[in-house]
Image: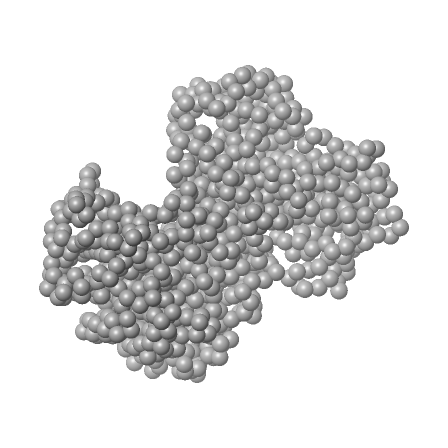
Amino acid sequence: MRQVECEVLVIGGGATGVGVVRDAAMRGFRSVLVEKRDLSHGTTGRYHGLLHSGGRYVVKDPEAAVECIEENRVLRQIMPHCLEDTGGFFVSTPWDDPDYGDAFLEGCRRTGVPCEEIPVRQMLKEEPLLNPDIRRCFRVPDASADSFLAGESNAASARQYGAAILNYHEVRQLLRRDNRVVGAVCYDLVGDEEVTITADMVVNASGAWAGRIAAMVGIMVNVVPGKGTMVAINHRVINTVVNRCKMPADGDIIVPIHTVAVIGTTDERVADPEHFAIEPWEVELMLSEGEKLVPGLRQMRMLRAWAGVRPLYQETAAADTRDVTRAYTLLDHAARDGVEGFITITGGKWTTYRQMAQVTMDKVCSQLGTERPCRTHQEPLPNPFAAEPQGEGDYHLLGARLARTEQAQSFGNLICECEMATPADVERSIVQNEAKTIDDVRRDVRLGMGPCQGGFCTLRVAGMLHALRRPSVTETNVALRDFLQERWKGLLPILWGSQLKQERLDELIYLSVLNVDRLPGEKSSKLGPSMYEEIGD
Amino acid sequence: MNLQGDVLVIGAGLAGLTAAWQVAARGGRVRLIAKGWGALYWHAGCIDVLGYYPPLGEAAVSSPAEAVAALIQERPDHPYARVGVAGLDEALRALQALCAQQGYPLHGSLERNWLLPTAVGALRPTCLAPETMIAGDASQPLPTLIVGMKQLLDFYPTLIADNLSRQGIPAEGVALDLPSLRECNFINAALLAKRLEQPQFRAEVVAALRPYRGRAERIGFPAVLGMEQAVAVKAALEKELGRPVFEIPGLPPSVPGMRLHGILTRVIGEKGGRVYDGMQVVRAEEARGRVTAVYSEAAARTRPHRFNRYLLATGGILGGGTATDSTGRVREVIFDLPLAAPNDRGEWFKRDFLDAAGHPIYQAGVRVDGSWRPVNGDGQPVYENVYAAGAMLAHCEVIRERSLEGVALATGYRVAQMLAG
């Protein structure tokens, strides 16, 4: 059993958790983050990739809109390499309340969200596939965000400031001495051992899992997982984020992200953050609502569907003391529950993760009786791709990988042709980032997410993993099978047409040509995917 | 170009090519049209007849003859039941004779499956394998050296070697870093195959291998040992290395698959037939229960092709002969033939990608009568003059069974016999 000591222990490796651990480390705290899977494995890695301008909330929730636009400006300064400056449209389709447009404009004015109405003619010039029957269009500073890269960059920054990031460490128990939380007992899934971590403060940043962590010390935190389902389309059907100009609802946004476009989302309360289904009606709704924005979308090739769980905080105790805005919730368990050394931060959006981290660490400082100012908004995050082609303003450039390949004239030197990932990218993930699974490599490198969904790169990454690490071969075999199953998981809800044909090719490769089902070793491992529930369960 | 003749084969996979070859060889006037280059470019380049048959056990089938006989007993609808073991054997022997005559022998028989290493180091049961592959057979646990090339990103020798070792075949892997490949900015299997036909490149490989030969009693390479002259390339390497040499097929495009495609295309031409690619059939015309023409897409318009009989060998879902959509519709794309298929999308799939029984949707296909004509719900042929072969046929799961090429070859052969007879 390992022992680790620190000042601040952060539970959860999503956007909030890595934001908190970076903030803590920059304020000079010896900090540790534990995450039970890989960084960004949970909700953070399963959203559509929108950097909010705030436009979405200007009418419904002005306070949230203000937070969004403030943070939108900050993130553009500190992490442009994680953002593509697509801009955003809010469009009034024939199905939307025509009066909402004026309310939207007024809301933008009041909350300070920059907004400009443009002629539909201009909109169609910029985005020719949008529905020509759209009546009004407003331009806002939305952008698309790479949440995997942002997570990695925050973690890298935290490490530079001395923090330890422990992924595949699952919290099994919170350590309590009298009325104080003093650490946690974790289980290291990869090392197969227990790790005891003691800390002066424990920050529960586990999102939809926050209630489960708090319950370990008998504290009731009611977080209802709100499932959102998204579908990726095999084309950049649009290059601008497109929102319906109406009160937020299901299937009302398309986000262009890297080489695809993502349509989202639903919002369904589920009982358990780990066990839920992607229902056929959800996929159907994405297609029919998407069709209203981009006619013909239904006939396009869908790559994949996935669902994440938003943490929806519900207050239960009447006399609670809490610092809360509509957008996120900070629970000081000393004041609320009489338990010292323990804070929960939950709710919120990816866009506001840094602000959430800041208020959390402000609270930690005041509890520890020290005054150390936040600096996370002043210092840019490290960019692992700094040497590669960048877009204007150092934003992510969609053509960066192509430019890189063209510069090197290395057209055949690719592990993933769909997303132009090179052997050097994969080697960096395996050696430097210590990827534990092929799915970890996917998040690091962005591979296996294009049309063939791992059909060609799974073998190649497994081969590289084996050559670079030389683990027991059965470990490589199960990593390969786990990844095939992980890809299958998100294909099941949208498998028809060309994508079904593609999957049959992947079967031909992995069964008929490679016989991977008969390789020695286990069929699946504890690091493998947990499947969506079956429909009707 | 508007084609005319007696038999039009649609599809350039193994079923279509076999059928066109056999019709032509028997004196029939045949043309083959296809959307692309056909499915052999994806295949390992062996003839899988039946690799697994769970009722006889989980292990790989050792005698395809016995296992096919058992399967025929159990499943009278399976395409093999319509062909019979003798019909299957005849088709295999005919292909073997053709390939031997073309200088690319396929070895093996229905009596015994080979167990050949794959590009991950699993052992794959297959009935016929080209001469370039058989030295890899796992029935002899000979010390083996697996050789890749650093620049070939589809082949990882240590993974293959470690898996072979784990299965009782002592093996080591090495990825050669060949100076002449360092300058290339594009390497793939087909390109390497051409290079290996050049003596100076082979000499470079042989020299680079000298330190590694050690106690290996055979040497495995990716399946790139020559395109047209594979057997000669293999023999030359064996001579220079002093060890048996074998190829291991891997990710598509497959050089051994291309070789088979080339042999069949050539023989069709020699026998007076012809293969056209880039001709996707988009619709058919019918009159009084007969198809009178099919139309293929060409620049700016469609072209009719009028034949007496039409053989549908467009493959299943992978080949593109069967299309599906989000509403759960499963459709044969040219003649809109009735398909045996699961009705509801909810029944198309199993939870595990590698499910042993396979995903029900992939068994979607046409049912045929005794003359291989697709039938309707009443068992009556839909058209008098439309026939079907290969993966388009219902009641088989050719990938799970490892019967992909066997079903294509045997049904293509049998239908051609009938059409030419």
Answer whether residue B248 is visible to the viewer in this image: no
Specify the quadrant of the image occupied by residue A336.
top right
Identify the residue shown where x is 66% and y is 36%. A348
Is A99 positioned to the left or the right of B359 in the image? Answer: right
Q: Position of residue A460 (x, y in %)?
A: 45, 60
In the foreground, A517 or A189: A517
Specify the quadrant of the image occupied by residue A364.
top right
Is A34 positioned to the left or the right of B147 in the image? Answer: right
Q: Position of residue B14 (x, y in %)?
A: 26, 62
Identify the residue shown where x is 43% and y is 62%. A510
Q: Position of residue B204 (x, y in %)?
A: 33, 71
The quarter of the rendered structure image containing the N terminus of chain A is: bottom right
Identify the residue shown where x is 56% and y is 70%. A472
Identify the residue shown where x is 19% and y is 41%. B302
* Colour basis: one colour
| Above-or-below relation of B146 to A456 | below
